[in-house]
Image (tube, grey):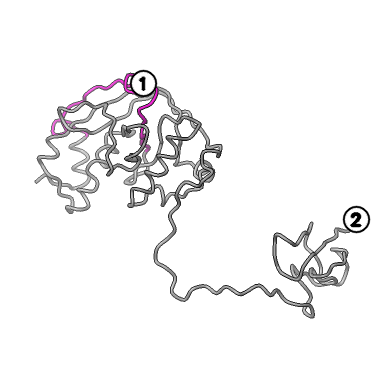
Amino acid sequence: MRAAKFWTVSNRCSASLIRTNGWTLGVKSCFSFRSGKAWDIGGHWTCCALANKRKCNLPRKLMPSNPSPSRAVWRPPADFSQRPIPVTRQPQRAWFRVHRIGQPAVFFGRFPHHRFSPPNGPFAVLYVAASIQTCLWEYFGDDVFRGQRVISAAKWAGCGVSRIVVPELKVCAVGLERTRETMGVDKASLMSPNLSIPQAWSLALQNHPSAFEAIKYPSRFLDQPCLAIFDRGGMPAKLHAQELGPLDKLDAAATWLDERYAALV
């Protein structure tokens, strides 16, 4: 087998300038302009230079002694519309939604306190969840934690649950690692309490040439799927809703309260 060779062009440790096709031995310096065998016998492994050669003269960067307690959040990059974001086919199935009694179950809105509802987005958004329990967590979860498992009885009595049959959709499944990697975002950014961050991602997806019809994402309270459906392509007419009744008359809702040890006050 022919010995591999290495070539170097400067005395700075710059990955963009040093060209190599394998690990090199200490017989030759990686700062030399001459080529040498990468497998000479008796040499010592090195990824830079011999001890008697010049060392890397790039400035040293030390870790901060007092690192920031916060982490970076990621917004859509400038080239987002050119990225091949994976399209996931969500089969037709029934989803659920908690809503105020007297209001239609199928209602697309642009509410600034909703995670994937950018105020300047081209499409209003409807939120549904995979189960009644997930809907209740999404609607009352903050009340459970903020009020130490106490929920307003009036708020509870004023809400009902509907079952909504949703046709097959082209969704962006942000719960999938390969989808997030292509997008260039992590879970924390999509779940940021600063809602302008996930709303920016929703806006980018609404404007993406793949023409997504929804975002599929995991609930922030439990690992169950939810959909943020976009009002595009005549979507409201494709959804079929059936009211299941008010919360105070549903066994599933009463079970959810019991499991949370939550009280209505």
Q: Quadrant of the N terminus?
A: bottom right
Pointer 2 residue: 2
Q: Position of residue 57 (x, y in %)?
A: 68, 75
Q: Of the residues shown, which amino acid type is indicated by label 2? A: Arg
In this view, 256 is above or below 21: above
Instruction: Return the x and y of residue 102 as percentages of the image width and height.
Output: 15, 27
Q: What's under tag 1, amino acid-wise? A: Gly
Distance from the alpha carbon under mark 2 to that under mark 1: 65 Å
Q: Position of residue 100 (x, y in %)?
A: 17, 33
The first of marks 2 and 1 along the sequence is: 2
Specify start and end residues of the magenta stretch as a single range: 225-252
| Residue 18 vertical placement versus 139 (above, below) | below
Q: How many marks?
A: 2
Determine whether, in the image, residue 174 is placed left or right of residue 113.
Answer: right
Q: Is residue 232 magenta?
A: yes
How packed mark 1 is, by other alpha carbons closer than 10 Å (few <14, some 14-19, many 20 or more), is few
Q: Where residue 234 is drawn, which disc sits there?
A: 1
